[in-house]
Amino acid sequence: IEKTLVRLDQQFHLAGIGFDPWQAALLRERLEKAGIPTEDVTFTSHNLTSMCSAVLESFNEGLIDLYAHNQLSQDLRNLRVVEKSYGVRLASPRGIAGHGDCATALSIALHVSRKIGLANTTVSRSIIAY
């Protein structure tokens, strides 16, 4: 994964890579040392609400164009918006194919793009990866 992200940064000059720090702390540290911008996305109530609204707004406002990826499409179809005491969040039911990892990666990427100011920008050759 690290080699792929380094290669992607060399090719696209990444604006940022969002990480769940619990899952990828060492990888994030190594990429930071390589000069690749990273952003920890802890699953706090604020971030979960932001991730949910970023996904919903991206689709509702036609701001996203996805390439064909069967697992991502399936994960997105399975997503549910769940109301919590702190607001809303996305929930992915656990199934044969996993627990919505591709949809979670997309929601992290959209959250980070908003945070670093790319949300309302047309980007022709940039990517945010998880």
Image (cartoon, rainbow, N blue to C red):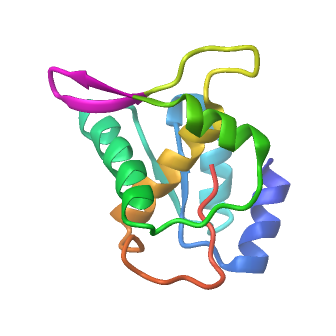
Q: How many marks?
A: 0
**3 on left or right of 121:** right
Camera-side residue of 114 and 71: 71
Location of residue 97 (image quadrant): top right
Q: Position of residue 38 (x, y in %)?
A: 53, 58
Does 49 lie within the magenta span?
no
Residue drawn at x 45%, y 67% is 62
Q: Position of residue 4 (x, y in %)?
A: 83, 57
Residue drawn at x 58%, y 35% is 77
Work out whether 9 lies above or below 24: below
Q: Main secondary structure of the magenta part?
A: strand
**99 on left or right of 69:** left
Q: Which residues are magenta?
A: 81-90
Camera-side residue of 93 and 2: 93
Location of residue 83 (image quadrant): top left
Location of residue 116 (image quadrant): bottom left
Q: Position of residue 117 (x, y in %)?
A: 36, 73
Q: Outermost residue, left direction? A: 85
Camera-side residue of 89 and 41: 89
Work out whether 46 lies above or below 85: below
Work out whether 50 lies above or below 68: above
Q: Position of residue 89 (x, y in %)?
A: 33, 31
